[in-house]
Amino acid sequence: MDIDLREYLKVIMKRLWLIILFVLITTITVAIYSTNSYQPIYQASTKLIVNQTLEMDQVGKEQIDFGAIGINIALIDTYKEIIKTPAIMDKVVQRYPELNMSAEQLISIVDVNAINGTQLMTIVARYSSYEKAAKVVNAVSEVFKTEIPKIMKVNNIAILNEAKMQNNPRPVNKQSNQYIMISFVVALVIGIGVALLLDAMDDTLKNKEDIRQIFELPTLAVVSKVKPKEFKSAKRKRTPKQVGDTPYVTTNN
């Protein structure tokens, strides 16, 4: 069966208002929902170093213990797991009640990263408020520094930098228009599909070609559709005659 694209185009143009209305309603609805549901997330971080790498030489001077460097790097993986345990987070909750967060909440927003091949590690906190994220990450870093000697029996943690307050922090999750664009495309496809479906379900005779195809008979005449404006204008052009009026002529004497 041959597909006449022109017929499809006629159907689409006929119901173009319906397609545009559906696309506008869908896109605007998704845009409003995306804007109202967007929650910015801010990130604050501190950097720590595992730095017990000095030993005393024969003359009493400190020198770098290269063997200890490898041990410290290996310890970072252990420290990453220790930080996100109640052993540290419970202490944070006790010492910093102003945070108003439980140990489970702290664990859920805190992450620990290690810089490969170095003795550095980064503690990161993500929250809907940058000020709260900075306070949390600073508190966790400080508690971890004081508690690790009790847990590991070694004092080799130093804080390189704390999270500082910012006037205009930028969220790490920028608002995206991806869902709005997707909703526009999907609504357009659905709108065109609905327009074609409505036309396929419409079994009325629209033109003489439909009559010839269904009844296999030729059409003798076609009554065109008269618009109300045309009907009124035609009525005005007619000059009505009153009953009893007769034409007459006058002669000049």
Image: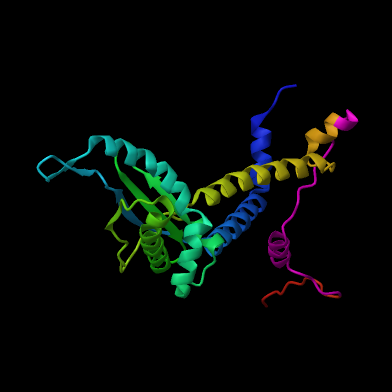
Q: Looking at the picture, how far across and down is residue 120, in whole percent?
A: 31, 46
Please tell me in which quadrant of the rendered image residue 251 appears: bottom right
Q: Looking at the picture, how far across and down is residue 98, in whole percent?
A: 45, 75
Q: Is residue 156 visible?
A: yes
Q: Looking at the picture, how far across and down is residue 228, in whole percent?
A: 72, 62
Q: Quadrant of the N terminus?
A: top right
Image-based side of 101 in relation to 192, left or right? left
Instruction: Report the residue that reaches farthest toward the left.
Output: 59
Residue 240, magenta (yes or no): yes
For the point 42% across and 49% down, the residue is: 112
For the point 30% across and 43% down, the residue is: 119
Asked if 89 appears above or below 4 in the picture, the reply is below
Q: Nearest the camera: 31 or 230?
A: 31
Instruction: Report the residue that reaches farthest toward the bottom.
Output: 253
Image-based side of 250 in relation to 128, left or right? right
Q: Looking at the picture, how far across and down is residue 250, in whole percent?
A: 71, 74
- Number of marks drawn: 0
Q: Is residue 218 visible?
A: no
Task: Report the predominant secondary structure element of the magenta stretch.
Answer: loop
Q: Nearest the camera: 247 or 107?
A: 107
Provide the residue span drawn in magenta: 214-243
For the point 66% across and 40% down, the residue is: 10
Instruction: Report the residue that reaches farthest toward the front.
Output: 58
Image-based side of 76 in relation to 53, left or right? right
